[in-house]
Image (cartoon, rainbow, N blue to C red):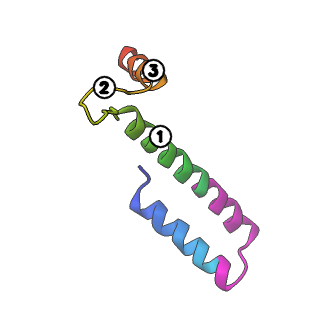
Amino acid sequence: MLSNEKIKRINELSKKSKEDTLTRTEAEEQQVLRQEYLQAFRGSMKQTIENVTVVDPEGKDVTPQKLKDAKNRNKMN
């Protein structure tokens, strides 16, 4: 996950961009921070999804095979 300081900086730059214009350096920093945030978010989401088990109303595991395969690949790594 992204540090609180980086998230705070993302918010500061976002607020500044709405109120005024960012310098070229600030705009580049904002892009780098956004990419870091997206990468962390996607990694977290992927981990969450790969830990899901789908169960039907009868209690049977109906997790899609693609998801089961992804879980098995991660266990091997």
Characterize the magenta stretch by its predominant secondary structure. Answer: helix
Front in this rendered view, residue 60 or 22: 60
Above or below: residue 44 compared with residue 12:
above
Residue receiving disc 3: 65
Q: For marks 3 and 1, give the one nearer the viewer.
A: 3
Q: Which mark is residue 43?
A: 1
Q: Is residue 29 above or below residue 17?
A: above
Q: Nearer the viewer, residue 77 or 49?
A: 49
Magenta region includes residue 11: no
Residue sitting at x 47%, y 40%? 43
Q: Circle 3 — which element?
A: helix
Q: Which residue lies at the image location 60% right of the left edge and 72% below the top edge?
A: 13
As measured in the structure, the alpha-carbon distance from the residue carrying label 1 to the one carrying label 2 is 25 Å
Q: CA distance from mark 3 to mark 2?
A: 11 Å
Extreme residue toward the top, this view: 76
Decide: is 63 above or below 26: above
Marks 3 and 1, the one that precedes in the sequence: 1
Mark 2 falls on what kind of element? Answer: loop
User: Which residue type does callout 3 highlight?
Assistant: Gln
Image side of residue 9 versus residue 53, left or right: right
**Looking at the rendering, which quadrant does residue 4 occupy?**
bottom left
25 drawn magenta: yes
> Which amino acid does the dot numbered 2 rest on?
Asp
Spatial separation of the CA atoms under disc 3 and disc 1:
21 Å
Asked whether the beta carbons under mark 3 and mark 1 sit within 8 Å of each other, the answer is no
Q: Position of residue 1 (x, y in %)?
A: 41, 49
* Residue range of the region highlighted in magenta in the rendering: 17-33
Where does residue 3 sit, x and y in percent of width and height? 41, 56
Quadrant in which the C terminus appears: top left
